[in-house]
Amino acid sequence: MTHCANNQHPPPRAVTSIVLPTYNERDNIVELVQAIHHHLQKQTFNYEIVVVDDNSPDGTADVVRATFGNDQRVKLHVRTHERGLASALRYGAEHSCGEVLVFMDTDFNHDPAMIPQLIKFLEYYDVVIGSRFVMRGGMEDSTRYLFSFIYNLGLRFLFGTRVWDNLSGFFAIYRSRLFELDLDRIFYGYGDYFIRLLMVGWRRGWCMLEVPVFYRLRAHGHSKTQFLNVFVRYTLAILKLRLYLGLGKLR
């Protein structure tokens, strides 16, 4: 689904960076990196995979070193003084060299097979979002799907945007677009960073495209998302964002 007129960019070239934030993902990370390699090996662009690990006690970083230590396409960064999803994504972007940045989860909610499609459409848009709530998108967990859909309807009404999946977190964006923003005001907290990113981009007139994705259940390990905690956290973040936008404090 398109949210503005076409805004053609030059085709993605040089390096694409896929940023993977990890915390206790030793059972997923090797399979995910191998899957990314599989789906990108026939592409015409160069790429790197930037793993940002928050010093996982399960040894995620050790597994990455042991498996991909000789793979120059895989860059591992271990953070010992900071922790959190949003800040890990920002750290990965700042320590990457890609002209195009792709952000995704590491639990196989986000299908690596969709990465080439996100990058392909970025030629015409400022950001391309993997969306659960456009035609042919969805989630394996029907209860979470229904709740998330209703919650996103509320976000559309509150902020007046046309984006269906404001909590996706699976997206491709040009580096130049991302770094024109005040990242201190966006990349903090958990998945609520994505709401702030979209709202600021929307106000700047970014061209956005949503492509359908289907979320499957976590492949291995346990989810770090507690439903009630996340609901309260996101709602408070949304109310704060609405206030800041109204006061002109976030641009």
Image (cartoon, rainbow, N blue to C red):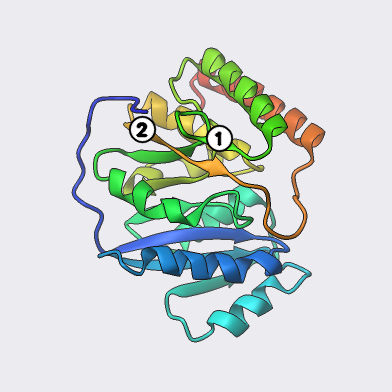
In this image, 117 relative to 21: left or right?
Answer: left
x, y percentage for residue 240?
64, 24
Instruction: Give SS at disc 1.
Output: strand
Mark positioned earlier in the residue sequence (1 or 2): 1
Percent position of residue 248, x then y: 48, 21
From the image, state whether disc 1 or disc 2 is nearer to you.
1
Residue 83 at x, y percent in the picture? 69, 56
Query: Dot 2 corresponds to which residue?
Result: 208
Q: Is residue 24 at all visible to an observer of this figure?
A: yes
Tell me which amino acid carries mark 1. Answer: Gly
Kind of residue at badge 2 = Met
Q: CA distance from mark 1 to mark 2?
A: 19 Å
Q: Which residue corresponds to mark 1?
A: 138
The C terminus - image quarter: top left
Q: Is residue 87 above or below residue 4?
A: below
Task: Classify 10 Å Cα crowding around label 2: few (below 14), some (14-19), many (20 and above).
Answer: many
Is residue 174 at all visible to an observer of this figure? no
Q: Residue shown at 53%/52% (left/top)?
A: 104
Nearer to us in this view, 217 or 152 = 217
